[in-house]
Amino acid sequence: MQSSDLLKSNAGHPFSPIKAILRYESIVEQIMGLIDSGTLRVGDKFPPERTLAEQWQVSRPVLREAFRVLESQGIVESRHGAGRYVRSERTLDFADIRRRHLRDRRAALLKIWEVRALLEIRAAELAATAATPEQIDAIERPVALLDSLPADESRDTDLNMEIHKAIAAASGNEYLSEMILNALEEYRILNFKEAVPIDEWKDLQEEHRPIVEAIRARSPAHAREAMEQHFNGLRAALDKWSAPLS
């Protein structure tokens, strides 16, 4: 099957746009589904990168990360100057892929969490004394939304980032807040949330509730403790899900 044939289906092409926040894993899953269904076979050539990015409505870095995973697993091969081809039809172990993802990023995640913990524990303390009622509402709003969403939908949002940004803003220290925002952007690039199972991600989000309750209660000590426990939970999840499969 030629690459032009791969663009044909009832909707005009077999590649469907990935809904919500776009993840490399969603692209990997869709490609594997096309291979399992026989739409893609060994030797088939993928359409050009620009075409796939438009069909999936994804950025090229997300697309390249998906192909990097598939190439590392021997499913796809990239031929210099000739494009990408299906190399194998074997089944992927997504649990192993998640672990590889986390192992690759483990050192960087630990470093950014060390920085974030130093900054955000202090921000939570300050917010417990300095936050206005409106700022506390701004912290609680994304927490409440996360509580109301199914696990898969909660991961497909930026609500986690909004919680931490709102706490930073409520600290009353614009310099501290700016440093936290910069650290959060570095953390976003490491893509931790897409590498842990959905249920585990949901459990981690529930750790925000004690932080909010401590801030509303105007208890700096409890806010500090709750934020510290949250970062300990993140590190524990990293240890658990980056371990090699037995």
Image (tube, helix red, strand yellow):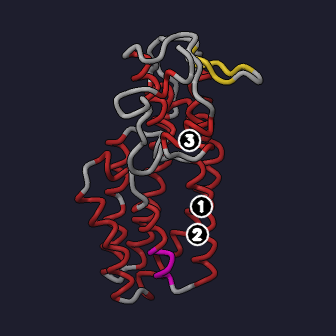
Q: Which residue is mark 3?
A: 53
* Residue that badge 2 annotates: 181
Q: Position of residue 99 (x, y in %)?
A: 51, 31
Q: Are marks 3 and 1 in contact (CB under 8 Å)?
A: no
Distance Cα–Cα, label 3 vs label 1: 23 Å
Where is residue 127 shown, x and y percent of the image?
Answer: 45, 81
Dot 2 or dot 3, earlier in sequence: 3
- Image: magenta residue range: 166-171
Residue name at image x 51 percent, y 75 percent: 168
In this view, the residue in front, 61 or 150, is 61
Structural distance between the alpha carbons of marks 1 and 2 = 6 Å
- Give the number of the mark in front: 3 or 1: 3
Count the labels in the image: 3
Magenta segment's dominant SS is helix
Where 135 falls versus 80 (above or below)?
Answer: below
Which comes sooner in the sequence, label 3 or label 1?
Answer: 3
State if disc 3 and disc 2 touch (CB < 8 Å).
no
Is 197 or 228 nearer to us in this picture? 197
| Label 2 secondary element | helix
| Amino acid type for the residue under numbered disc 1 | Glu
Label 1 sits on residue: 185
**For the residue marked with disc 3, what is the amino acid?**
Ala
Q: Which amino acid, by three-letter code, is at mark 2? A: Leu
Horizontal side of residue 122 vs 18, given as left or right = right
